[in-house]
DNA sequence: CACTTGACCTGTCCGC
DNA sequence: TGCGGACAGGTCAAGT
């Protein structure tokens, strides 16, 4: 489940490894992975990869001549770049991916580039999508039209966030943050992290947040995202590497998958609930229920908020 | 329209 | 040990 920082880390790696290569051919092994008519494949052959950008969680390969190849990894999509069969970049845990034979059993598509370089799209759950579009259809695409501001851009202002929260005033704040039209690139993990940092209960109604809380929330989102990018998408080593076998973000996460462990800020046992249909981790003390309507929030600044980080897994069970 | 739930998928884990 | 079901969570379609 790559979110913005993981896709950004992936983007940077691709810039290092495949920029300026030419697309030679594309193989698709799972039809629905290609979100376009099969005939679209032929259009990209021969085009040079002039730039690689990103918008939210979507990777944008800028092929010259007004053509774009979009990759959305969704839940489990990973990219692995190989040269003559040797892994250059990406994939799962290095110790394993280095030896992994490509194509992998989860390989849904392969993009063959010049200089014997190939990019494998491996995706266990088949949710990842590849699209091939020109500028016109890219700018007219509903997904991109609705997409909110990049969290680290100047466009992501307190006013912009407030507007979105008012627009979805009766939905839980967490649901509104997961909505890509509010701010681009947040997923389940960083939403939980940002809400914890901002000390806001995930189920509070979006329209009930005070101005101060909205301000704090914006700052927390930016901080969480910026830190994660700095760490190189720490979440999963080289982007999109959250295997089900246990590699996890670990050190950086304050609440993600830490239910039952002490809150890094106050030591209270972290809890897990379901919000907007998703597993949600939070601290019942730092992120008080208050009244869902807002007022009467127990003041979060009564107790000292910064405490030494307790050891990971401190044996609660 | 605002908001919620189910479908898309496969692998893992938990309880019986 | 095997088996059914819950769960993982990004996005869209369908439902309330």
Image: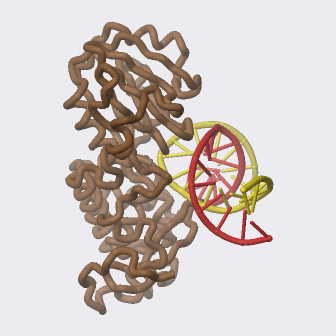
Chain colours: A brown, B red, C yellow
Residue depicted at 48% across the width and 13% down the height: A40
Residue A287, horizontal then vertical, whole percent: 41, 79
Viewed as shown, does residue A43 lie left or right of A39? Answer: left
The part of the image, by quadrant, that contains residue A200 is bottom left
In-front residue for pair B4/A16: A16
In-front residue for pair A62/A89: A89
Whether A239 is drawn above or below A69: the answer is: below
Residue depicted at 52% across the width and 24% down the height: A34
Q: In this orientation, does residue A184 appear?
A: no
Residue depicted at 35% across the width and 88% down the height: A299
Viewed as shown, does residue A136 lie left or right of C10? Answer: left
Viewed as shown, does residue A189 lie left or right of A278? Answer: left
Number of numbered discs visible in the structure rendering:
0
- The residue lying furthest to the bottom in this view is A302
Residue A182, horizontal then vertical, whole percent: 41, 52
Whether A125 is drawn above or below A202: the answer is: above
Viewed as shown, does residue A244 lie left or right of A197? Answer: right
Residue A56, horizontal then vertical, whole percent: 36, 42
Residue depicted at 26% across the width and 29% down the height: A52
Q: In this orientation, does residue A71 appear?
A: yes
Residue A183, horizontal then vertical, whole percent: 37, 51
Whether C6 is drawn above or below A129: the answer is: below
The part of the image, by quadrant, that contains residue A87 is top left
């Amino acid at each position: 489940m790559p979110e913005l920082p993981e896709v950004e880390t992936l983007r940077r790696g691709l810039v290092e490894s495949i920029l300026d290569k030419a697309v030679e051919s594309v193989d698709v092994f799972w039809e629905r992975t290609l979100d376009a008519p099969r005939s679209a494949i032929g259009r990209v052959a021969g085009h040079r990869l002039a730039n690689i950008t990103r918008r939210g969680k979507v990777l944008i390969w800028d092929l010259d001549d007004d053509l774009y190849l979009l990759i959305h990894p969704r839940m489990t999509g990973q990219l692995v770049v190989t040269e003559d069969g040797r892994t250059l970049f990406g994939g799962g845990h290095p110790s394993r991916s280095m030896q992994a034979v490509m194509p992998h059993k989860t390989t849904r598509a392969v993009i063959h580039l010049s200089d014997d370089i190939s990019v494998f799209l491996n995706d266990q759950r088949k949710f990842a999508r590849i699209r091939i579009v020109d500028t016109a259809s890219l700018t007219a695409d509903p997904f991109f039209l609705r997409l909110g501001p990049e969290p680290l851009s100047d466009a992501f202002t307190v006013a912009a966030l407030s507007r979105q929260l008012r627009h979805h005033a009766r939905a839980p704040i967490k649901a509104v943050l997961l909505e890509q039209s509010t701010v681009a690139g947040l997923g389940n993990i960083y939403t939980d992290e940002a809400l914890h940092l901002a000390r806001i209960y995930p189920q509070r109604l979006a329209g009930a947040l005070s101005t101060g809380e909205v301000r704090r929330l914006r700052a927390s989102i930016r901080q969480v995202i910026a830190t994660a990018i700095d760490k190189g998408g720490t979440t999963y080593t080289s982007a999109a590497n959250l295997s089900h076998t246990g590699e996890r973000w670990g050190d950086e996460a304050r609440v993600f998958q830490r239910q039952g462990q002490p809150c890094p800020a106050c030591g209270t046992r972290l809890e897990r609930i379901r919000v907007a249909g998703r597993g949600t981790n939070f601290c019942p003390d730092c992120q008080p229920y208050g009244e869902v309507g807002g007022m009467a929030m127990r003041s979060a600044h009564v107790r000292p908020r910064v405490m030494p980080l307790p050891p990971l897994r401190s044996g609660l069970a």
